[in-house]
Image (cartoon, rainbow, N blue to C red):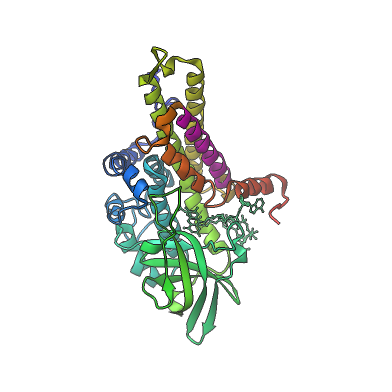
Amino acid sequence: PPPLRPNDYLGIDALLSDEERDIRDAVRAFVAGEVVPHVGEWFEQATIPRELANRLGDLNVLGMHLTGYGCAGASATAYGLACLELEAGDSGVRSLVSVQGSLAMFAIWRWGSEEQKQQWLPRMARGEAIGCFGLTEPDSGSDPGSMRTRARRDGDEWVLNGQKMWITNGTIADVAVVWAQTDDGVRGFLVPRGTPGFSAPEIHKKLSLRASVTSELVLDDVRLPDSARLPEATSLRGPLSCLNEARYGIVWGAAGAARACFEAALDYSKTRIQFDKPIASFQLVQQRLAEMAVKVNQSTLLALHLGRLKDAGTLRPEHVSMGKLANVNAALDVARTARQVLGANGITLEYPVIRHMNNLESVVTYEGTADVHALVIGHALTGIQAFR
Ligand code: TGC
Ligand code: FAD
């Protein structure tokens, strides 16, 4: 058999096609060159450069699993591998890509008119226009059906009032996909930046996902033509279908964050000397390394399995819930374990570990909390819905 490599213990690389490996390697090189050297600073300054979106557009990862309209048309597995590498850099960078491609672009691609697709998708794929996705509200998180944002028909126009909260990319977005209640159920609207009555103030004081813009969306008598409505979306199924796409990316991304923490701990344990020996020579440290390696490999295999199901057209939302629940919890465990292996160095931004650990506290909450995904799985197992 080929030699065992600590960074690919189970030989998962061999399960990928040449094309998948090429895409993975290109994103990995991009992250090594353009994210890793700067992301500690971005995190500390609570910022992410706008130009990064253009660079990600050049890399062809924005909406890369969509077809037509300037999108790369890559496989779901290739898109997942890209998410893994991006999140090995930082969850904020993967968030930017998820929200752009899987939420905002997917909403337009799946539920939009031909005119809306032509207008927005090519520019979004290049990173020239940024999108955001407004579903969550101050009083409506896990239960999006309780949203209060309303769109009222007024002649040929719609009038939107309400507030969205915790919206990734909101302040920098050129177009916001806003979900609102109407007399006929939930509908989606494209709200361009600068529309009178619309603003997107940034949320500050976050201690997680700091290299990511998070915003409020305020809609105060925002008037839109009917052509701003996503014509094909007619219920909560519209936004929830987009969540399936983004959650799928997180299944992979979480495995990337875990891998980065594991690799940092493995390297550190071999060079840090205490009691005259590398700490890697102590049994308790080796146990931690072994547990982390198990979780990194299990999550990557689970992500790859879901990727193959998605490419075969047999992936169900319930599968994605299992992946998100398992892989984000595993990544949090790995990050917390790695942080201890690094001792005091584990608490600084000189190493990636505590940044990932703090980021993952957002990842376990957004896109459906761990509880929501446990209940989706419980529903699938028992046939009994336990949400309400
Ligand atoms: P329920 O009555 O079950 O369903 C309402 C309608 O939706 C359909 N549906 C789905 N369709 C597609 N995919 C899914 N996963 C679906 N789940 C349900 C369902 O068939 C029905 O369709 P129709 O046509 O009959 O109307 O809905 P419910 O109100 O009981 O809620 C179910 C629940 C709790 C699972 C759901 O609401 C939920 O997922 N809650 C969590 C909310 C959430 O995840 N929010 C995420 C906001 S976006 C975000 O966090 C971005 S962060 C990204 C980043 O920065 O990376
Ligand atoms: P709640 O729904 O109030 O939940 C609070 C607690 O109660 C959780 O532990 C939850 O699991 C538990 N709980 C709730 N209901 C049940 C139940 N039935 N059974 C058991 N336990 C339950 N949203 C967007 O729309 N777009 C975005 O771009 C976006 N980006 C985000 C970025 C960041 C950094 C963060 C932190 C959030 C983002 N969100 C976004 C919002 C995110 O989707 C919500 O935070 C998430 O859906 C949970 O909603 P909530 O925070 O209101 O928590």
Q: Position of residue 255 (x, y in %)?
A: 46, 38
- Of 49 and 73, nearer the camera is 49
The residue that appears at 47% across and 52% down in the rendered structure is 246
Q: Taking 1 as reference, is 186 above or below it? A: below
Q: Is residue 327 magenta?
A: yes
The residue that appears at 43% across and 77% down in the rendered structure is 197
The residue that appears at 37% across and 34% down in the rendered structure is 351
Q: Position of residue 63 (x, y in %)?
A: 38, 55
Q: Taking 154 as reference, is 297 above or below it? A: above
Q: Is residue 12 visible?
A: no
The residue that appears at 53% across and 58% down in the rendered structure is 241
Q: Position of residue 114 (x, y in %)?
A: 40, 70
Residue sitting farthest toward the bottom: 155
Q: Position of residue 170 (x, y in %)?
A: 41, 62
- Of 87 and 161, nearer the camera is 161
Magenta region: 320-340
Total numbered circles: 0
Question: Would residue 321 appear left or right of 204 to someone viewing this image?
Answer: right
* Rendered-image quarter of ligand 2: bottom right
